[in-house]
Amino acid sequence: MDGSESDDLDHLFSETVRETMDGSVYGAWRSIRDADAVPLSFGFPYPESFPNGELVSAAESLFEYEGDRALQYGGGEYADALPAVIVERARDRGIDCTTSQVHLTNGATNAIDTACQTFLDRGDTVFVEAPTFMGALRLFRNYGVDIEDCEMDENGLDVEALAADLAAREEAGDPLPKLLYTIPNFHNPTGVTLPEGRRERLLELAETYDFLVLEDDPYGQLRYDGTEPPPIRALDGTGRAIRINTFSKTVAPGVRTGWIIAEEPFVEQFDRINAGGEPSYTRGLIARYAEEGRLDRAIEELCAGYRERRDRMMESLADRMPPGTTWSEPDGGFFVWVEFPEGVDAEGMLPDAIDEGVTYLPGSFFYAGDNGTRHARLSFSHVPPAAIDEGIAALATAVRAEVPAIGAGD
Amino acid sequence: MDGSESDDLDHLFSETVRETMDGSVYGAWRSIRDADAVPLSFGFPYPESFPNGELVSAAESLFEYEGDRALQYGGGEYADALPAVIVERARDRGIDCTTSQVHLTNGATNAIDTACQTFLDRGDTVFVEAPTFMGALRLFRNYGVDIEDCEMDENGLDVEALAADLAAREEAGDPLPKLLYTIPNFHNPTGVTLPEGRRERLLELAETYDFLVLEDDPYGQLRYDGTEPPPIRALDGTGRAIRINTFSKTVAPGVRTGWIIAEEPFVEQFDRINAGGEPSYTRGLIARYAEEGRLDRAIEELCAGYRERRDRMMESLADRMPPGTTWSEPDGGFFVWVEFPEGVDAEGMLPDAIDEGVTYLPGSFFYAGDNGTRHARLSFSHVPPAAIDEGIAALATAVRAEVPAIGAGD
């Protein structure tokens, strides 16, 4: 059938799809993805970190141990054991939970989506950090909710500004949030971490104003300096904290297995509405791989690899960026948030930056509204240290060209 | 926190979750799953069929060929090639399509869910065959739609009864369906196949009454007799046929990779609302495994293994079941639909049948309303032929006990 006939079928889409179908940023994504330039754009692990050989060994020993059960519906003993692996590791981080408080998902994105489907009705209000993970914004939009920005500073979510906003909304009779989405550790895209006191205050507010806190923590175990504040879920006495995590950053993205830790009545509903779940084969592989301490050793090696990359990006930014540029200094994770000098439009500069030899994600990608035009997210996770320096040099050249007053030589 | 506090959070669930959270059949499932009896209940492949060693080889050669790309976000060339593999195999079955008409999913269940999210609004009407796949019923319920039964006979969906129902609804101003869900080949649970003429008539009705046809075909390639009618999608000139398929039955359930073939504008929206997608690692593994004809050879072997099991179940039913029992005679797939003599309540008989040494799924599980009480689904896919005979013998004993008038020896 030709395009004109297809167009006639658009009325069959759901109301929410019709409302959101033209709002994508795929065009910009594609130009970044296909660029011949140093990719500081994507939050990808560095490929040398992937446990190729270990996963072949895990497959061999999984099949040897489980025989025909490994590929069956539900999988075998290792697949069954993965929630216990998750519980044990969560306990090491201060989260007291049981396997009946764990719901496995097809990666963290599927986990966010499951929470959306379980809790959100059209017209509900969702609070997000501004800026926040664009993938989460995309999912929330799919549920027809109102997305409201929360202010952040160099210590993450500004909980006192949030308290004032909630009080003002209650006073005015404006909608209160059903759910607040936060990335408390090495935030995407800013790299900042929420201190313990703010986590406690956030939980107080959740109880007072009766909303859920969706804690997304893909990067928490990738810490290169300092000590970890307790996970929000570890501090929660209200049952309102729902914690999302994934093996995508600690094993590999290709295995795409995540999980949710929450109160058991919530997990029962996640299990019930779940549309298929993660493959039992990869679940078994990960459980087998995690055995014998391999996952912990891998995380140590990853931290060493990422620390070196983080340090190199900090040095390069300090050495090369023109005055008026500032950036966050993350203690872990993948990302640095850069503010360019006045007069720079980060999205408009992107084609020139690509010509100079670097890609980044414009800050505007990370806001529900029109914001972040002077910002960019740089990822140090993906390329070797030398390429990071090359990319930052290209970025500095692009910025200088954008703001001639700075002068080519500084 | 304790249970009473958790209960206080139920108001945070979405409206649809609150409406559906108490309607599950999980209790009955568990008693069947944990029974010490011949499992004729579950539609599982027989475990000897799983390609354990081949998947280890595929992993080794995938890593050798793709190096660090195999486990990265998006995967490498093999993961990229899977849609082309699917297109080529679909063309062999008469479906003219391109890779931009293919959306990959995390198994067929995730595919049904994606179609639900893309097309259904609360209050929409969905037509289903009665009986139908219980997993699909569960998913439709999650979307707050009205589920209406369509009549079936020994040739599947009764399209003339459907035509009359649609005309009557239009006349009366009653809701018309947004979507009709059908399993045209070796239907779950009845095992019957929809003839070509009915497929064409169904598409005419879809165009006339402006609804989508969701064609779920997990078993179509597992044919042991006769020739295949064209897939509904192959006959479709309206753009309304959306075809779902999976590698769960031809490779293994553990790899949990499925797909949708549909018009490109639909696929664009599936891609956009997609919450994570299937793991790129298993995608690459399957593409590598399918190469060199291994998948085709595997399907030939599977058909031989299932044909033997199907034949044994047919013989056992004929030899052992008491008079008044009838059953379908499937040309493929996994399932036989049994109608017991009058006076038998299939769900009520289940505990006694388990005591005798067999499990089945009561027919009532496969209806949205109160139906199927005299029916059961038997699966011949999972156990060896000798166990099938043992299970049918136990079933016959249970039925005779239920209807003493038949007599113990008959």
Image (tube, coloured by chain):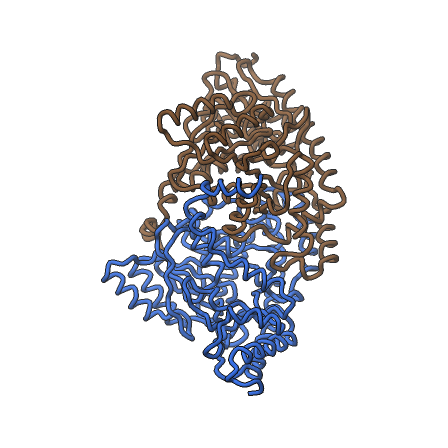
Chain colours: A brown, B blue
Percent x, y of residue B167? 26, 65
* Residue A297 seen in render: yes
Picture quarter with the C terminus of chain A:
top right
How many marks can you see? 0
Q: Is residue B320 above or below residue B168?
A: below
Q: Residue furthest right?
A: A292
Compared across the picture, whether A294 is left or right of A135 comes to right
Q: Where residue B236 sits: x, y (%)?
A: 38, 62
Residue B6 vs residue B86, the one in the foreground? B6
Whether residue B305 appears in this view of the structure is: no
In the image, B119 versus A291, the foreground residue is A291
Decide: is A323 above or below B237. above
Please report the residue visible at 32 percent of the width from the left and 53 percent of the height from the top. Answer: A5
Q: Quadrant of residue B44?
A: bottom right
Across and down, in percent, residue B355 comes to 62, 71
Nearest the viewer among B89 and A278 is A278
Q: Is residue A29 left or right of residue B305?
A: left
Q: Residue at x 35, y 25 (%)?
A: A172
Where residue B14 appears, as percent x and y from the top left, is: 43, 44
Residue farthest along the bottom direction in this orientation: B410
